[in-house]
Image (cartoon, rainbow, N blue to C red):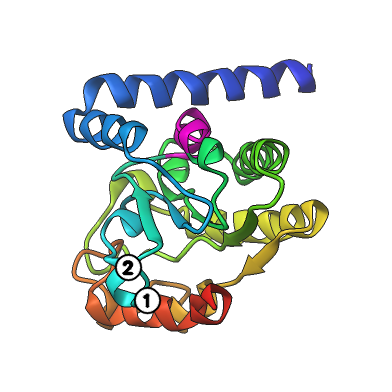
Amino acid sequence: MKNLALVVVVALMGLTAMAQANQDPYYARRATLFEELPIGKKDIVMLGNSLTDGGEFNELLNNRHVKNRGIVGDIVQGLIDRIDPIIKGQPKKLFILTGVNDISHDVSADSIARAMEKLIVMVKQGSPRTKIYLQSLLPFNNDVREWKLLKGRDHVVVEANALLEQVARRQGVTWINLYPLFVDDQGRLRADLTNDGLHLMGKGYLIWRDAIKPYIK
């Protein structure tokens, strides 16, 4: 029964990703653009959801080889669905951050970790020379703005990060724990780094940049 339940969860995640691509015009535009833009062996790919989408990482890191492959609203299964063009390019490095949208869809921390491990295995098998950097989920702050689908789910971020760190160790990829840099003493995203409780202001991207800069070099 446990295995059956897992199959159902994974299937539902896949359906959610497909529905998202079909119903969200922005997602479809961005995803199809990424299918056309080439990735090269010198490239450093930033893969994720709206947090990644919102960052001008090539400018932040002053590196023309940094390519942004973030899409607003994406989930782990969405990254799996659109990983092939990235694998095809055999990039030098891949930075991954996603999961909060999965939590808003009531996906468990365990299911997020399992899907992320599937993604990492796909990259390792398809592009074995790519160095993979798995980044932790960031906290959110419902006191700045209420995200109804995330209400009372702060603990899932913590649980998911613990499991994702285990995935990183098990798969031999680099774990980057961003969470402590963004959380306040109440377990929420620092109010000075956001204007909506979920997404980052400029100062937040500078913190993120400084955290990953050593791995870029």
Q: Can residue 16 be found in the magenta stretch? A: no
The magenta-colored residue range is 75-85
Residue 194, disc: none
Question: Along the line of sight, which residue is nearer the eye, 194 or 77?
Answer: 77
For the point 22% across and 28% down, the residue is: 24
Compared to residue 213, the image places residue 45 above or below, namely above
Residue 31 horizontal/vertical position (percent)? 31, 33
Residue 61, disc: 1
Compared to residue 111, the image places residue 39 above or below, namely below
Residue 57 horizontal/vertical position (percent)? 33, 67
Q: Quadrant of residue 143?
A: bottom left
In this picture, residue 44 sits left or right of residue 36: right
For the point 59% across and 72% down, the residue is: 177
Main secondary structure type of the part rendered in magenta: helix
Report which residue position mark 2 lands on. 58
Compared to residue 44, the image places residue 181 above or below, namely below
Residue 147 horizontal/vertical position (percent)? 28, 52
Count the numbered circles shown: 2
